[in-house]
Image (tube, helix red, strand yellow):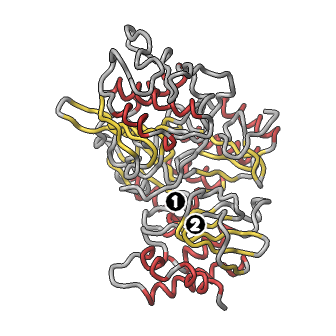
Amino acid sequence: MNAFSRRGACPALSAPMQTGDGLLVRLNPVAGGLLPKSLIGLGESALRHGNGIMEVTARGSLQIRGLTAESARLLAAEVDALGIAARTGVPVEIGPLAGIDPQEIADPRPLAERVRAAIEEAGLTARLGPKVSVIVDGGGQLAMDALTADVRLTATRATAGVRWSVSVAGDERSAKPLAAVEEDAARDITVAILRIVAEKGREAHTRDLSERQLNSLASWHSVPPPSVLPDISPARGEIGSSADGSFLASLAISEDRNQRAISPLAGEMSGRTEGGAQERRPARSPIGTFGLADNHALGIGLPFGSMPAQTLIELVGQALALGSTEIRLAPSRALLFLGLTASACPALKASAATLGFVTAASDPRTRIAACPGTPACSSGRIAARAIAETIAVESADLLDASLTLHISGCAKACAHPGPAALTLVGDENGAGLVVDGTAKALPAGYRPGYDAARGVADIAAAIRNARHLGETVAACLARLGAEGIAELYRRN
């Protein structure tokens, strides 16, 4: 741990990332969830070695902040002592209720494990960029529709049983569909896709694939084939023996038939980043109660994805006393408490609300992405989360399902790298407003940081007066126009 990972690389236990409030590490348990006592142990480690802040990210990863080089080493040792195995390699993500949801079409875990193993066997981890990811979605109450990925494998019902729809480059609505195939083919197409991406370089994603490559991948519907991917393989599809049911070690894919097959490169294989966490609201929020086969799960959100470790420890302790047996991390910055009885769910929900957690999907804080800002982060120029709390209380009606508000302490855009309808960003001039853009864009207007929430309140007041019946906030903002919104923010 002599060198810290660059921004955009995975801040894994073995490669913490430098941030404005110290080093940050991120982990995803191999088992998918944590025992309550293990999460309590992690919280105690965060108090000992970090700044006492724990986070759940937009993609459902756990983060511990404010570490030093030495304390990060101590934290990693304590994670090992707790028996928590952290997932490494290319992210192959599954839903938070995978394998226990009676409404899911198929359990995605076996296919996800086969995909992970095949990626490692093919030597692709070191070849792919840190933001390349795969989603294996079995459906059910908490599908993964809202998260982007380079490859999506989605369970569908077919006459012959379950098939897996393969699509690339996007979320459930925007990804390009390629084929609907059986499990073996889904695994092998996924690895074939990632080989092509790897050949293009570590900055590449599936959005960079050519139409010819996509068409060839889409034409592949069975495994093992006598000739695979004839349009994109330098061997015109002859990729070696498939007698053992696997072609992964000998597959050669290139746009140029004169190029040689891809071979693995040696390199750090400790993990990947969150990438692609430009959320759309899922069909169902993870915040709420979910019926399982024999018990219930209760989803509770962290406001802006963050909570003091001591507060989280207190909540987990109460969940343990109420019979919770496992806690799973969920996209949209939430925790799922499993193993609860129907009567225990309201009690835990009430305790969570008292402690300041998000207990309703309609909570306006779920529409705001906010980084720590000042004083927690030395890079911050505004108190992002304090501003967010004020806006959530005073301008809640601005935050309907059509709108995301991003509040960034600086232009790094750690909390929300993509565009948002409204973004407040701190710089040397105060709190700048960006309309329909990212925190890196040039603000259209400024207010002092301490007064930013009042500027947003002026925008909310104008929308109340201007909205047509049935019109969303986003549609009203578009009608008012960027310059008009900026003027509302700047005035007074």
**Residue that badge 1 annotates:** 352
Q: Residues within 10 Å of mark 1 (few under 14, many from 20)?
A: many
The kind of residue tagged 2 is Gly
463 is higher (above) or lower (below) than 7: below
Q: Nearer the viewer, residue 154 or 440?
A: 440
Query: If the image is split into quadrants, where does the C terminus sit?
Result: bottom right
Q: Nearer the viewer, residue 226 or 326?
A: 226
List x then y, in percent, for residue 395: 53, 79
**Residue that badge 2 annotates:** 437
Look at the numbered disc 2 and give the secondary structure of its residue.
strand
424 is higher (above) or lower (below) than 116: below
Q: Is residue 196 visible?
A: yes
Q: Residues within 10 Å of mark 2 (few under 14, many from 20)?
A: some
Question: Disc 1 to disc 2, how far (Cα)?
Answer: 34 Å
Q: Residue furthest left?
A: 159
List x then y, in percent, for residue 242: 39, 11
Left or right position of 181 against 428: left
Q: Is residue 326 visible?
A: no
Q: Residue at x 70, y 74 (%)?
A: 431
Query: If the image is split into quadrants, where does the N terminus sit?
Result: top right
Left or right position of 260 against 477: right
Query: Marks 1 and 2: which is nearer the front?
Result: 2
The kind of residue tagged 1 is Ala
Label drawn at residue 194: none
Q: Residue at x 31, y 41 (%)?
A: 104
Pick whichever of labels 1 and 2 is earlier in the sequence: 1
